[in-house]
Amino acid sequence: MSFIKNKSLASQGLEKIKWVQEHMPVLKELQRTLGESKPFRGLRMAVCIHLEAKTAYMALVLQEAGAEVFITGSNPLSTQDDVAAALVHEGIETFAWYNASPEEYAEHLYLTAAKKPHLIIDDGGDLVSLLHKSFPNHLSNIIGGAEETTTGLIRLRAMEKNNILAFPMIAVNDARCKHLFDNRYGTGQSVWDGIMRSTNLIVAGKNVVVAGYGWCGKGVAMRAKGLGAKVTVCEVDPVKALEAYMDGFQVMPLLEAASTGDIFITVTGCSKVITEEHFAVMKDRAILANAGHFDIEIDKESLASLAEGPRRVRHNVDAYTFKDGRRLYLLGEGRLVNLAAADGHPAEIMDMSFSLQILALKYLRENHGRLEKKVLPLPLELDLEVARLKLKGMDISIDSLTTEQKNYLESWEFDIG
Ligand SMILES: NC(=O)c1ccc[n+]([C@@H]2O[C@H](COP(=O)([O-])OP(=O)(O)OC[C@H]3O[C@@H](n4cnc5c(N)ncnc54)[C@H](O)[C@@H]3O)[C@@H](O)[C@H]2O)c1
């Protein structure tokens, strides 16, 4: 039995799914081929990812490929109720609604994990962690899973290090067709979509401070520059800091940037990046947004203890007023702003990420019993297959190496005379 908010929204959700489908040619191709071969026939699949239209389309492809799919969202603010209703309409058991309380979110996750899955798709590691903690009897049943994001991989690698990971997990985030596009261009665009939708303010001319210059941070900073902002990057990794500097950004410690920034975006995967000492020197009306996986990067608790608030001033905008009269505005409750306040990454980007997910599960299925219970890379050939299909879907052809070129690139003896 599904747990959703409003079944009557199904037709609206189905329209949303149809829209993204038209922009996801690789998934469409997998739907065609796997819909015929049905590699997941007889398997139960638990999925925990931000529940919006692209995710729903992936779930429908998995269902068509033979799986019995159970799905929940990976963040209380990223579920779209109409999309959840559409999935139920299509026969997928769904446990999620927008704005779930922490208890409801935990219950939705629990109900999904309780379905005794054979295969898993996780985004952030909550599902895998819960299965290990609360369902030890289910673990031997699990063939393996695929993890979508950087933060999830950090958690999985900690489990592997402690020798408790009970099944193989494929690091989809590390595939080139994932982080080079999803983390960089996807986050780069959708974070600004979320900030602009929620504030309706101009970006040009503003001082934008980006904390974290990893794959996501690069995209966020690049797009801020394109929108006309003056961008400062804050980092803890000296190489990334240098890279940001040579990419043309100002680089300085966050405390220094705190007093000049108009918009702050954290995207580090780390906790307590913006804290009390930064709030203390920020300008009146500075905007705070997070794009990292969990709502731990902006210290909301200390914000609430230091200032009056939150007072909802617009959809997804909360004001915190300090004793000296300064107001700070927190977007999307400090949860990842591109999903809390917008629709997440563009469909063309998630086309690749979700196709990698499906191919990872197919690989796990085909190699059942042969893989180590570790965090494993996605085989390069599958990464390349997604890139080839994507290029084909975009009607772009490329060159290939001649035999002579291949031989040259594989040889070590050169004729220097
Ligand atoms: N919003 C989205 O849609 C979305 C998409 C993909 C990933 N993510 C999440 O975004 C976060 C970052 O992902 P990524 O792929 O860019 O990771 P990454 O590892 O490539 O980059 C993170 C960067 O943050 C830096 N950093 C760490 N702690 C810091 C601190 N205290 N101050 C300043 N910099 C610090 C690191 O040095 C690193 O360069 C993760 O939580 C990931 O799960 C979000």
Image (cartoon, rainbow, N blue to C red):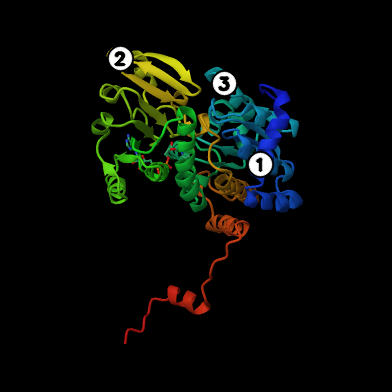
Tag 2–tag 3 contact (CB < 8 Å): no
Identify the mark nearer the N-term, 3 or 1. Answer: 1
Amino acid type at mark 1: Trp
How packed mark 1 is, by other alpha carbons closer than 10 Å (few <14, some 14-19, many 20 or more), is some
Q: Residues within 10 Å of mark 2 (few under 14, many from 20)?
A: few
CA gap, disc 2 to disc 3? 32 Å
The answer to whether residue 147 is left or right of residue 215 is: right
Residue that mark 2 sits on: 325
Mark before the other along the chain sequence, 2 or 1: 1
Image quadrant for the C terminus?
A: bottom left
Q: Are marks 2 and 1 in contact (CB under 8 Å)?
A: no
Residue 19: mark: 1
Would you name the residue on which mark 3 appears?
Answer: 100
> Against 416, is 166 above or below?
above
Q: Amino acid at mark 2?
A: Gly
Q: Classify mark 2 as within 8 Å of ligand 1 or not, answering yes or no.
A: no
Q: CA distance from mark 2 to mark 1?
A: 45 Å
CB within 8 Å, label 3 to label 1: no
Above or below residue 388? Residue 125 is above
- Image position, residue 93 (x, y; %): 70, 30
Q: Report the front residue among 77 and 101.
A: 77
Indicate which disc residue 154 carries.
Answer: none
Ligand 1 located in image quadrant: top left
Name the quarter where the N terminus is drawn: top right
- Residue 332 drawn at (x, y percent): 47, 26
| 377 and 54: which is toward the camera | 54
**For the point 58% across and 44% down, which residue is it?**
347
Q: Position of residue 108 (x, y in %)?
A: 61, 24
Question: Does dot 1 land on a helix, a strand or a loop?
Answer: helix
Disc 2 on helix, strand or loop?
Answer: loop
